[in-house]
């Protein structure tokens, strides 16, 4: 999910995880040979982004899902602000 957010941010923008919630729906007793977890951004704003992920098994049944809240910050803006306040 973090990578989904990362691809939606402009160059020079950093981010960190503010909140991460995962829910396991079914037990995972075996590692599927072909697993295809998916992540997508739900909202990307100037200061924060939200992403959601899902982990289906090979038959398409949902095994787990998660939500991620990500605050973003501009590295270049922070450096510029630091220079003007000194």
Image (tube, rainbow, N blue to C red):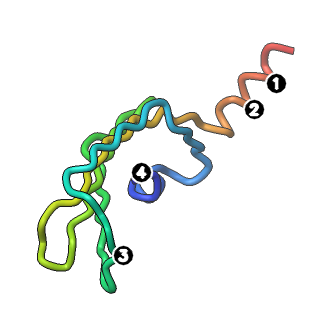
Relative horizontal placement of residue 72, taking residue 30 as reference (left or right): right
Q: Which comes sooner in the sequence, label 3 or label 2?
A: 3
Mark 4 highlights which residue?
5
Tag on residue 79? 2
Instruction: Relative to 19, say whether 24 is above or below.
Output: below
Q: Residues within 10 Å of mark 4 (few under 14, many from 20)?
A: many
Instruction: Relative to 48, say whether 29 is above or below.
Output: below
Spatial separation of the CA atoms under disc 3 and disc 1: 51 Å
Q: Residues within 10 Å of mark 3 (few under 14, many from 20)?
A: few
Mark 1 highlights which residue?
83
Judged from this view, the residue extending furthest toward the front is 29
Spatial separation of the CA atoms under disc 3 and disc 2: 45 Å
Q: Secondary structure at mark 2?
A: helix
What residue lies at 20% left-to-right and 56% top-to-bottom? 26
Where residue 53 sits, quadrant-wise, is: bottom left
**What x and y, as percent, mark residue 13?**
57, 45
Comparing labels 3 and 2, the label whose residue is closer to the camera: 3
Instruction: Name the one closer to the observer, 11 or 64.
Output: 64
Mark 3 highlights which residue?
31
Q: Secondary structure at mark 3?
A: loop
Instruction: Name the one closer to the observer, 71 or 76.
Output: 71
Relative horizontal placement of residue 6, taking residue 21 as reference (left or right): right
Judged from this view, the residue extending furthest toward the right is 86
Judged from this view, the residue extending furthest toward the top is 85
Q: Is disc 4 in contact with disc 2, using a CB cutoff of under 8 Å?
A: no
């Amino acid at each position: 999910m973090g990578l989904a957010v990362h691809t939606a941010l402009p160059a020079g923008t950093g981010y960190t995880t503010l909140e991460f919630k995962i829910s396991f729906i079914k037990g995972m007793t075996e590692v599927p040979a072909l697993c295809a977890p998916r992540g997508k951004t739900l909202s990307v704003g100037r200061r924060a982004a939200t992403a959601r992920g899902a982990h289906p098994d090979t038959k398409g049944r949902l095994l787990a899902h998660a939500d991620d809240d990500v605050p973003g910050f501009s590295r270049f803006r922070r450096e510029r602000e630091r220079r003007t306040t000194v």
